[in-house]
Amino acid sequence: MSDGADVTTDGSRGPRPARVRHATAAETPAVGPAAAPERPAVWHRFKKRFSPLHKLERRLSALRDIARLKKTDAFDPDWYEAAYPEITRTGLSPLVHYVRKGAWEGRRPRADFDPLFYLSMNRAVAASGVEPFTHYLLSGRRTDPTLATESRALTHAAVRGGRKRERGWYGAAALTRAQVFPGPRAPGFAADAAALPARTPHSDDSGADWLMRLGPVELLQEHILTRTAAPDVPPSPPHPSLSIVTVFDGDRAAFARTAGWIGVLLAHARTAPVPALVEWIVVNGDPACAVAEIEAAFSHEVRAATRLLPGGAWRGSAEGRNAALAEARGDFVVHLPPGEILAPDALALLSHYARTFPLCRCICPGRVELDRNDAAIRRCDPPLGAADLVFQADSGEPVAFLRADLCAALGGFDPRFSGGDTYDLVLRAASREPILAIPEPVLGRRAGPLPRSEGAKRARSARADAIRRLVDATWPEQRQPAAPRAPVVHGLCLVRTQGRRPDLLAEALGSIYRQSEPLTAAVIVHADAATFAEVQRTAPRKEGRTLFLHAPDTSRRRGHPWNVGLDHLAANAQAYQYLCLLDDDDIYYPLFASRMVEGFRLTGADVVYALVNRRPLGGAPEPAHMPLPASCLVAGNFIPTNSYAVRTDVLLESGVRALEDVDYFEDWDFLVSLLAADCRFHLIPEAVGEFLLIGDGNAPSKRDPAHHALCLARVQDRGRQAAARRGIGRFYRDLMDFDFHNPAIRHPSPGGHLILAKMQFLRSAAAHAG
Amino acid sequence: MLDERGAEPAISVVIPVLLRRAEPGIPMLRRALESVRDQRFPGPMEVVVVDDGSPRPVAEAQAALGPAGIGVRFLRQTRNMGVTSALNAGLQAARHPLVARLDADDVWRPGKIERQAALFAADPDLTLTATGMVLVSPEGKTLAEHVRPADWEPILDFCVDVGCPFPHGSVLARRDIYLVLGGYPHLACYETCEDFALWSLWLRFFKPRMLREVLYEYTVSPGAVSQRHGDRQRKASDLLRADLRKLALSRTAPAAMAAFADALGLSLVEAGVVAWRMWRFGLAVALPEAAIPPLRAAMPDRDVEVRLSDPAAVEVRDVLAPRPQAGLARGGPIVRARPLA
C-alpha cells in the first residue's frame, strides 16, 4: 500500500512538491471519530472463537487509521524512515509499517510522540486496540501535548512552530530567513543541492534496536533541546580560520581527489573579501607509504597549505584524527576522510554562520552524494532537528565543523567509537551546548556501497553511552559499594514432589548428585505421611547430600512445599550460601552448580539465572523460554524454576515467601517478589537444565478459569508493586545491560513482553507522581 | 603443559557411548579402547566411558572389552540425555588436566597422543590440539582425508569459510579451559553442533594448534549424528559461521590476545581467562591503559567502556582467582565490556 510518495527506481525518493511539516497538536484538523466503533458483546464472543475474524477486524482498523493519518499530514514518512532504516527491509511504506507494526513495536511516528507513553496514560485506548497516534490526533486529547511524550522540551519545540527543516536549526529553534546563508553558492557540486532528491536511509543491520524503541530516548532529546551556551564561551572570530584534518589510509586515488578539491577550496578562499586562513593536516596512517608518495598528490598551492605528519597504522581510526587535532591551529576543525571533498565555498559558509551565531562551536552541514564525475546526484540532509539527532546514528557519519576549544574540552574523537566517532563527538557537543545544523551541503562523498554497518554500530554504541550517562545522572544507583560477602560455596536445592513419579524424582536427584560443586538435595514431599515414608525409602540418596522434609498440608497449594524448604534454609543458613529449586520432572545439566557459583562469585549478583531446554517425552531438547531483562518479570515470567539460584543471605533478609493459595503462578510471584526486594539479577546465557513436557500446560486455566484469572491478577499486582519499588531507571538499566545480540539467545519476538513491562513501569511512575 | 609437580601431563580420555545393540557396538568399542591402549601416554592416564542411557548398561559388558577394558571407569546416565550431556558429565568426572575425546566407533592411529602431548610440552600457551582425520566406512574402506590448517589465524578463517575446524575425536585440550567456558553448550539451537559452538567461543580467547597428520579414523555410519541430523547440523553450523564472519576475528584475535597478555603481564592462557570472563559476565575490571586497545580489538561485539571508578570493580587477579569476589578494585581505569546497543 503506497503513501503517495514518488519512489524512483534506484530507491531514492523523488522531490516532493510540497514539504511535509509536522503539524502541531493545535493545528491538526479533526477528521472524524477517533475511537473504534462500539460493537455488541456477541461480536466479541464470536471473534474470540474465530481468530480469522479477529485478524479481519485488526486489518480493517489498520486501514481506517492509515486513511486518517494520511489526511492529517502529521505522520512524516521521511522522518520515520530515517529513524528506523531497517523497516525498508519489510517492503512496507513507512505509514503502513507504522500503523500495522511500528506503533505496537514501540516505534515513534515522530520525535515528539511516544506511543507507549500515550498508551500507558490512557488505559482505555490500550484496551481498545486503536492505534495510539491516530487516537491522540483525532480525539479531544490533541490539545494536551503533555500526553504525547514525557519530554516537556519536545512538546514545546513542536508547539513553537514545528520544524522548518529546509532552513536548519540552532539549539531548539529553527533558523529564520535572515539567519540562513544568503548565497549565492559558489559553482561546484553543492550549488544546486536543494533540488536534488534525498538519500533513502538504509540499514543492513536487521537487529532490532530495543534501546531506541523502549529506552529513555526523550531523556536525551530533552537534554539536547534544553542546552544553553556556557557564559564563559568567547565568541568566534568573524572570519575564522579552518584546519582540515585527513588521515591517509593508503588509497592514493581517493586521496588525490581530495587533494585536488582542497586546491579548489584554497583558490576560492583567496578571492574572499577577507582572506581566510586554511591549513590541511594530513596524518600518514599507512606505514607502507612513504611521505614522498603522499606529497605527489599535492599541487604547489596545496603543498604550501599542508602539514604532513608521520603516523602509525591508523587507517581511518580516531587515534589518527586526534593526532591531527593536536597539531591543528585553526579556529575551527573539520575531519575530511580521503576521497571526500569540501565545497569550494565552505569557508564562506563557515564565516557567515560563525558571525551569525558567534557562540556556536559545532556546525553540522549537509552533504551530497557524487557520481564518478563529481556531480551531485543526491543530498544527505543534516539531522532534521535537535531532537532528531538522537535518531540519526544509522545515517552515516555526519560532517561537523568544530571549534578547536570545544574539541579540546570534549577530549577529541573517542577511539571506542571508531567508525561512528564523529557522530559521538557531535552528540557530546549537543549534550553540552546548542549546536547548529545548516541546510547547505558542504561535503561531497562518492555514491557507492551503503554505509558500513560497523560504523553505524559504533554510532549506536555512542548514542547508548550518552543515554546511559543520562540514566545514571537522572536515576543514580542507590547502592553502596558492596561489602565483602561470604564466598558462595554450598547450595541447597529444594526438590518438590508429590511422590507420584519416583522414576523422574530419581533422575532429578541424580542430576543434583552429579554436580561437582557441593549441592544438597532437600526432597520436600507434599503428600500424606505414608507417601512421605515411601519416598524416604525409595528415593536415591547420597551420603551427606540428601535430606527429606515433609509438607503434610495438602490443602495448601504448590507454594507450600517451597516454604517448608525455606524454613529449613532459615534454620540452617550458615550451611548453605545459595538456594535453588527443582520440580521432580526437571533435571540439571552437569555443570549447573558450577555455573551458578561462578555467576555469584564473579558478578556479585543476588540472583543468577540462565536458560533451560524443554524436552517432549521421548523427543529431543528444544529451546524453552527465552530470557529477557530481569525487570520484565513485572509483566510475565520467563525464568523457569530450574534455571536460577538465589543467595541465602539476600533471600532470608527479604522475607520473600511462596504463595500457598495460588495454582501455577507461585513461581512467577516468587521471582517478582525478589525483584520487588531490589535483588540484582544476572543472566548467564547458557542452558543449565531441562524440564519435561508432560500433560497439557493449559489445564489449570481450563479447570478453573476464575481462579486462574484471580491468581494472574494477584501476581500482576505484585508486578506493579515491584515496578513502583524499582523505578523506571532500573528498567532502563536492565534494558541497556541486556545483550539482545547474543546469538545464543535469538529471541524470536521479545517486543510484546518488553513493551508490556515498560508500560507497567510508566504507569507505576505516573501513579507515584500522581 | 606440565602439571604442578613438573611431571609429564596426565590425560583423561572421555568416550561417550550409546549402545543400542551389543553387535556391532561392543566390538567397535573394544576396537576404540584398544587404539587408546596402544597410545604412548607421557604420564598418568584414565579412560572414562560415559554410558548415555544404553538399553543395557555398558559396564555389564566390560569383560567383553578385553584387556583394553580393564581399569575403565564407567559413568551411567540412566536416560539417554544426548552427547552434550554425556560429554559434560565426562568432563566433570575427569581427573586429569588434559582431556581427550573419542567416539565409541572411532579409532586413534599410533602416535597420536604422543605427538599432541609434545605440542603441549613445547608451548605453555597452547590450550587445544587436534589432528587430521580419515573418514572410513564401517567396513574399513577409506573414503576421504581431511587435514586442516595448523595455526590460530587460518583455523579461524576455516571456521568462517567451512565450519567446525576440529575433528572432534582428535581433540586433546585443557580441562580447566573447558570448565571456564562452561563445557559444551546445551542450548537446543546448537544440538548436533555443540562442539563447533564451543570452539567458536574457545578460539576467540585461547590458542589452538592442529597437527597436520592423519591420526584419527572417523567411521561414517548411518547411525552417526552427522548422518541422521545432517540438515539440522548444517543449519546450526551456518548460523555459527555467520556470527563468526561478522566478527572478522582471524585478523585481530590472536594478535589482540597476545598484546592483551603483554599489557597485563600474564600468560596467554591467563589473559584469555580474563578476557573471556569480562566478555561473558560484563565484569568491571581495573586494567592498565595499555590493555584497553587490544581488549577492544578482541571484542568487536562489545562496547569496551572505560570509567574512573565503579563500586563493582575487581582487580585482574580477582578475576583469575578460583573464587573471585566482586567489589575489591582499588585503582586504575575501570574497564567493562558491555553489550552493543
Image (cartoon, helix red, strand yellow):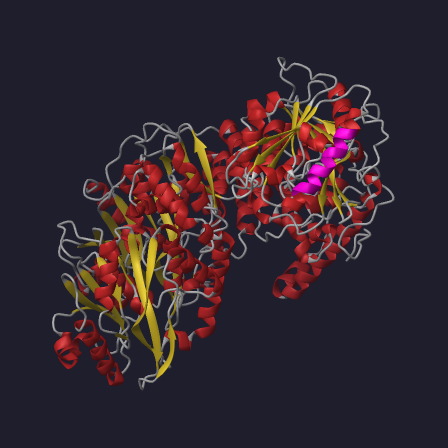
Quarter of the image for residue A140 reads: top right
Q: Position of residue A430 (x, y in %)?
A: 63, 28
Residue at the image point whose x is 19% and y is 70% from the top:
B39
Residue A386 visible to an observer of this rendering: yes
Quarter of the image for residue A259 reads: top right
Viewer-proximal residue, B134 or A71?
A: B134
Residue at the image point whose x is 41% and y is 77% from the top:
B228
Say left or right for A736 vs A386: left
Note whether A29 is above or below B238 in the view shown: above
Residue A121 visible to an observer of this rendering: no
Note whether A375 is above or below B106 in the view shown: above
Say left or right for A111 vs B208: right
Viewer-proximal residue, B208 or A283?
A: A283
In the rendered structure, does residue A599 fall within the stretch colored magenta? no
The quarter of the rendered structure image containing the C terminus of chain A is top right
Q: What secondary structure predominates along the stretch shown in magenta?
A: helix
The quarter of the rendered structure image containing the N terminus of chain A is bottom right
Q: Position of residue A424 (x, y in %)?
A: 58, 34
Residue at the image point whose x is 67% and y is 39% from the top:
A297
Residue range corresponding to the magenta coloring: A255-267
Say left or right for B299 vs A76: left
Q: Position of residue B109 (x, y in %)?
A: 25, 74
Q: How many marks?
A: 0
In the rendered structure, does residue A263 fall within the stretch colored magenta? yes
Viewer-proximal residue, A323 or B5?
A: A323
Q: Position of residue A582 (x, y in %)?
A: 30, 56
Note whether B27 is above or below A123 in the view shown: below
